[in-house]
Amino acid sequence: MTKKTKIVIIILLIMLFFIGFIPIWAFFIEPNLLISRKIEIKDPALKGIRVAYLSDLHICQDGKDYALNMVKKVNEQKPDIILLGGDYIVVQIYKNKSMKADEIIKILAGLKAKHGVFMIFGNHESRPKTTKLIIQSIKDTNIKLLQNANTKLQIADKSVYLVGIGDYSNNSHNINKAFNGVDSTPVIVFTHSPDIFPYIPDYVNMTFAGHTHGGQVYIPFYGPLEKPTHLLGKYIKGLYAEGSKKMFVSSGIGNSHYKIRLFNIPEIIIADFK
Ligand SMILES: [Fe+2]
């Protein structure tokens, strides 16, 4: 065997090792990770404000410890506001079941932010039975529902409107209702599906969305493995800017259908305005 052949064989063996390792990583390692992803957004009108955005939690029956760790990680970041972007339960997941919505709320009640914890519903909370249970369960917590509604917050020296918009993917959005009474800027919007972005008013400073899971399996230089799927439209993950508007799409925390993730490490978004 020549030296050249030996090198080729070694390279092939290394490649085979990594190819074989990918499914193990995607099925058993990556979905169990959780990072706090820090992003900086330039906007003098919101300067100094820290927002935590969490979406697509999809908490399963065996996910209590993971969810408690998530709450701990968010609180450690000391955000001014925490925005919960929907999909707390999971309607369909292979060989597992969703945690009940009231049990999920008990865990999320541990979230702490100086200026409040706010939530909207995702497409997995489209059944009236689920939304009713969540509305009932948050009554004894510090979580406020902003489903097609808004509130004015005083954060440091700034008056900020926070607008929650219902999910566009299941037609639960009502932009007029959500913005009713909003008469000044800056404005922060949080929602579930990012496909609503073109309909967000131009004067909105920042929008946070989720829903896509980043495709769950994302191949570098190619994109999501299955495209398009029911999840994916124009916006997949990361920061988007159109005209004066900006939107950050999180690839979220949990999974639907299958517990699998590749190049989409579960993430808590910590956004610092500079
Ligand atoms: Fe989701």
Image: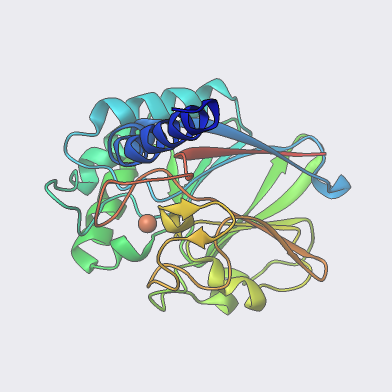
Location of residue 174 in the rendering, given as x and y in whole percent from the top left corner: 51, 77
- Residue at the limit of the structure toward the left, as seen here: 95
The x, y position of residue 269, in whole percent, is 57, 40
Foreground pick, 158 / 236:
236
Any part of residue 131 in sight: yes
Q: Which residue is drawn at 66% across and 69% down?
A: 181
Instruction: Using the image, determine if residue 225 lies above or below residue 134.
Output: below
Residue 242, position in %: x, y? 76, 70
Q: Using the image as rendered, state which of residue 251 and residue 75 is in the foreground.
A: 251
* Residue pictured at 27% horizontal, 25% vertical: 65
As drawn, is 66 to the left or to the right of 205? Answer: left
Q: Is residue 22 left or right of residue 101?
A: right
- How far from the left and from the top, in percent, is residue 89? 27, 51
Residue 248 lies, with reference to residue 11, above or below; the image says below
Is 245 on the left-hand or right-hand side of 102? right
Look at the image and tell me in which quarter the C terminus lies.
Answer: top right
Is residue 109 visible in the rendered image? The answer is no
Q: Which residue lies furthest to the front in this view?
A: 1
Determine the residue positioned at 44% across, 58% down.
215
- Looking at the rendering, in which quadrant would you find the N terminus? top left
Ligand 1, seen in the image, is in the quarter at: bottom left
Residue at 39% over, 51% down: 56
